[in-house]
Amino acid sequence: MPTVTGLSCGEFYRSGGNEVTVEGSGFKGASRVYFRDQNLKEYDAQSFKVISDSRLTLIAPKVSDLGTFHIYVIANGQKSTTPETTVTVPDGDTMAATGTFGVTNTTTAGNHNKILSVYAPGSLDEFGKRDLISEIKKHKGNQDWMEWRRERVSDGDLAWFDHQVQVWGQA
């Protein structure tokens, strides 16, 4: 069964076209590599090449939204998994006598295949600008988000972005 343990980067361009290296195991015989968004919509990689059983490279697809995606590999008819991660969650009691102190350790799938879609430098066409204004409105007053987002806008679009934040993003 294929397993994804890491990616060469944490972001890809919404417009697609940039290369991402996927690390893991069980990639020989891969027949499909795709990105899945939060709404479970799937986007096939433009292309991919298996370098070895533990590494493949892909060309990111064009996607319709910004946000979080997960990359999956289909090899020999099986969908990739990610290593499990131990997390601590509240268990609803605070009973010190049981030794849990209100928490329990459990496992969950890891985020080793998680990647974020962003605008490519200089790619803010009218459609992209409209989307970004919607994001600014949604995060109105959130200075940390505004700074994080500003770092991802190309130099050519910074003046436009700063103006939109003044118009739409002030608390």
Image (cartoon, grey):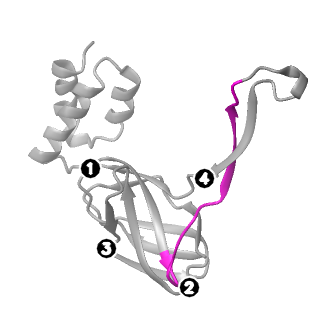
Q: CA distance from mark 1 to mark 4?
A: 23 Å
Q: What amino acid is at disc 3?
A: Gln
Q: Residue at x 38, y 59 (%)?
A: 36
Spot the residue most to the right. Answer: 97
Q: Earlier in the sequence, mark 2 or mark 3?
A: 2
Q: Quadrant of the C terminus?
A: top left
Secondary structure of residue under mark 2:
loop
Circle 2 packing at 10 Å, graded few (<14), some (14-19), many (20+), is some
Name the residue that disc number 1 marks.
Answer: 65
Vertical comparison of 140 with 155: above or below? above
Of tags 3 and 4, which is closer to the observer?
4
Query: Residue 107, percent across and down?
Result: 69, 48
Say if the magenta span includes residue 81. yes
| Kind of residue sitting beneath label 1 | Asp
**3D distance between C-alphas at marks 2 and 3:** 19 Å
Disc 1 vs disc 2: Cβ atoms closer than 8 Å? no
In the rendering, which numbered label is found on residue 28? 2
Q: Amino acid at mark 2?
A: Lys
- The residue under the point 27% across, 58% down is 63
Q: 36 or 124: which is nearer to us?
A: 36
The amino acid type, in three-letter code, at marker 4 is Gly
Tell me the residue that label 4 is attached to.
Answer: 110
Image disc number at residue 46: 3
The magenta stretch is 74-92
Q: Residue 20, position in %: x, y?
A: 44, 66
In the image, what residue occupies the spot 20% across and 19% down?
A: 166
